[in-house]
Image (cartoon, coloured by chain):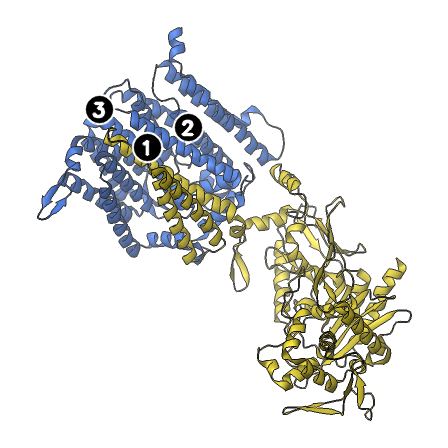
Chain colours: A blue, B yellow
Amino acid sequence: MSAIVRRFRFTEFQLLVAPSLMTVVGLLTIFLARTGSSRWTWSDIWVSLGYVALIFLMTIFLSATGFKGDQVLFPIVATIAGLGLLEIERLNPVLKAENPNLAHVARNQVAYIAVGLFLLLLMMVFVKRLDWLRRYKYSLGFLGLAMMAATVVFGTDINGARLWIDLKVATVQPSELVKVILVVFLAAYLDDYGDLVAGSYRFLRWNLPPIPYLLPMFLMWAAALGVVVLQNDLGTALLFFGIFLVMIYVATARLWYVVVGLSAFAIGVYVAYQMFDRIAVRVQNWINPWADPLDKGFQQIQAEYTMAAGHIFGTGLGYGHPQYIPAVETDYIFAALAEELGLLGTIAILALYVLLVARGSLIALRADRGFPQLLAVGLTTILALQTLIILAGVLRLIPLTGITLPFISAGGSSLLTNFIIVGLLLRISDGSVKT
Amino acid sequence: MSGFFRASAFFAATILLTFGMIVTKGHSSRTWFFLWLAMLFVASVLITVAVWPRLPRTIPATQRTIAHGATLFMVGFLVLGVQLARVQVADSAIISERTHSDAGNVDVQDPRHRLMASEVQRGSIFTSDGKVVAQTDKNPDGSFIRSYPDPATAYLAGYYSPLLYGSSNLEAAYDSELMGESGGNPITQWLDGILHRDRRGYDLTLSVNQDVQDQANQLLGNQRGAAIVMNAKTGAIVAMASTPNFDPNKLYVNEGPQINAETDTAKAYWEQLTSQQDSPLLLRPTQGLYIPGSIFKTVTASAALQSGVAQPDTVYRDEGALTVGSRVIPEENRPDNNRIDYTLTDAYGWSLNVVFAQIGLQIGPQRMQEFAQKFGFGSDIPFELPVAISELDADPSFLSDQASLAVTAFGQGQIQATPLQMALIADAVANGGTMMEPYLVQKISDEKGTTLSTNSPSSWQRAIDEKTASQMQQIMINSVQNGYASGAQIPGYVVGGKTGTAEVGGDKQPNSWFIGFAGKTDPEYVVAVVVENGGEGTKVALPIAHQLLQTALQLDETK
């Protein structure tokens, strides 16, 4: 008995109370705002009740297995994912009106979360020894390349970008999983060759970075630009390259590698901007969406109206007008949240992501040196960069790039991948498992 | 030292961001956009310097780099927060007002404005005697219809066409009050907002009297012109008429089943209004700019008296013509062609151009400018509706020419004045030298009739001192008793006034003007009337002003 009490993840359990209340009360608010009445039954909010059940089952299961890892990470993720669920549920009628195919987007989101939590558990059960991931780094690397190549060859274009493969049952976005594979591969590679990468050699009169650095650097640069050119997607390229640079920096502590890499990327993107229309349109919309307010700039302008309408306190859940932003459920879902929750709400959401990144970094700091540490850094970087890039795009600090807001944007591939990332981070946080 | 350095970096970043938000506020052009981004970048570098973790060498390198990476991410999130504060709060009002128009039609605007128009019942507008100017009713299907039952006041309310042409006049000036967004108790408004209570806009009660306004419209009839009756002591507008005008009922378009029919009517009517030569959409009392003619002699005479150049009984010679430089000013107004000597008072009453040309030359260009400014020329008259700025001269060197100065003194030359400006000149004389701030809206109240705010009269600016004002009053009263303005007499009341027949050039009929005041013992109301190409002031504008004053004075009798 005392063993069970000792093992019980009390902090995690406690921290899950707030997100549970939030999802239940939030959904109730949305439901009542929509119907305009004060009558409701428990079945109206089954989505949230189901979600609450899932996250508590999760924590109880973790306690039961005697898992000793981080207790704060999961509640943070549960809060963000709960918020995402609420917003998808809130947008459901809007999306239904826009596109009948999206009628079940909210129900799907719960299903994805359930599958995501299952994957999270799988990560914890099967990746018992992280070494396993490390051993198969080249196989994984090839798998990742193959997935990207398959996307280019068999992919479907959505919104002009070729990021999806239509499997008839569902449309999957391989790049989501590829970024995790990239992190695993880089962590293993840098752990093996880190010392070599940090060194340098003299060529004629100059100290040059070593080949083990230069080669992957060049390959990554080429691959990232390949994504820009072949898949027409600036966001994914930026994300991949950003992950690469952060990991190089962490592994070698050479800031100037980052500077050189970033400059090379910027030059590449500039050339692409000159050559490809879609990138040019994004840049034009960034500088001045009012140049073409009826067509290309329309979405950005509507998103700005929407965010501005939120003011400090917001209109309240269910009382905003997200329907004016085309395709609001993807890139601009944050704008819809901004209108209904106001500045107080958006700052709170930012704070949640800050906590997530801080917790991820803490797990990385506490992890064993070498592969686990680099892996934790890479996984945290995925979440941090992805959030920063999409939000900076929505807020017009950089050109908008079509990547998802972790745990909030609708979309199965991204949600599942993010739960895999959390699963791996939790795994790493359990110091008792030695590599 | 390091602590101080970090603190100052942080402080500098805060200052830079605050400064940046203020200077770039509302600017959306490329340059300002990049300026703000540059400021944000510099600030983020400063903040990074301020919070950069300095970790001892004893800590493993990877741990240090992880801490550095996390710090950079945190700064990134901070920058997002700053931008959010800018978009959602600092610039929020400006962003929601941004629109794009194509050939006069707004094709991109915040759709929330349209939505508001179909969700909030807009407040009503009443005259001071409780007649409806504008009202919003609910159709059986829940949509709203705004109507203006009385054509005499409808155009003063302005049009309200949120889906097509925006709004004008009072509908534009008091939009946020009529929508219940401002003017009430801010805490109640905030509570209404967060509790999602049904909102209704606030009602406006005007100072305009239905009877006087009706009469002003009737008297102007088919002529083009403007008439203003204003309370001399408070600045309350009792009537403000403009002809030709328009029917705002036909421009109303809002969400609802009849939107297509409304849109068609509105577009056709708008097309007709904007193509018409005589600008029915122009609110002439505030927007019409006219050459004032002889009524401007009120300013010249005031300037002469105030600056001590002349007294009311100073005698001038009028021999039937005056040569100034190369220009001959003929005199057509003498009551008796054999009489040569006239006092200032006589000259005003008989409207003698030759005498006023001499007074103008005596005053000189500087003082002419100075007094015109004191009477409000060149300034934006404080009023709820936009007022065109009246000007004494178009080019600054105009008055340095003697002949130009002479003709300006009797109201020709390059003077351009709004009827409201001329009414305020009469007000300065009637009100002891001070012009009141004119106003149309007496009070704002909520649907239960609770008064939220009332307009309290305030004076605008002093034109002349009290002594000069009382001398001018006598001169204007004399003009009605013994001069050309004798048609304006009202038995039992003190009436002062001045007619004007302003030459507009070419073979067009002159503009017909009258300004004046009337009261039991003291001036109570001032009036200004202009009829475009109406002919002589005495024959056209004076009778209109005379009747309006009579009606206005009777209001107080029947009270």
Q: Are marks 1 and 2 on the same chain?
A: yes
Tag 3 subunit: A
Q: Where residue A316 sits: x, y (%)?
A: 56, 37
* Residue for badge 2: A76
Q: Name the residue at the bottom extreme.
A: B338
| Amino acid at circle 2 | Ile
Q: Which one is closest to the eye, mark 3 or mark 2?
A: 2
* Residue for badge 1: A380
Q: CA distance from mark 1 to mark 2?
A: 13 Å
Q: Give the mark, 3 or 1, whose residue is nearer the N terminus.
A: 3
Comparing B513 with B318, the one in front is B318
Residue at 42% from the left image edge and 28% from the top image edge: A76
Q: Give the mark, 3 or 2, whose residue is nearer the N terminus.
A: 2
Q: Where residue B166 sits: x, y (%)?
A: 60, 58
Q: Name the residue at the right extreme.
A: B492
In the rendered image, which quarter is residue B83 located in? top left
In contact (CB < 8 Å): disc 1 and disc 2 = no
Tag 2 subunit: A
Q: Is residue B406 above or below residue B130?
A: below
Q: CA distance from mark 3 to mark 1?
A: 20 Å
In the rendered image, which quarter is residue B537 located in? bottom right
Label 3 sits on a secondary structure element that is helix
Q: Give the mark, 1 or 2, whose residue is nearer the N terminus.
A: 2
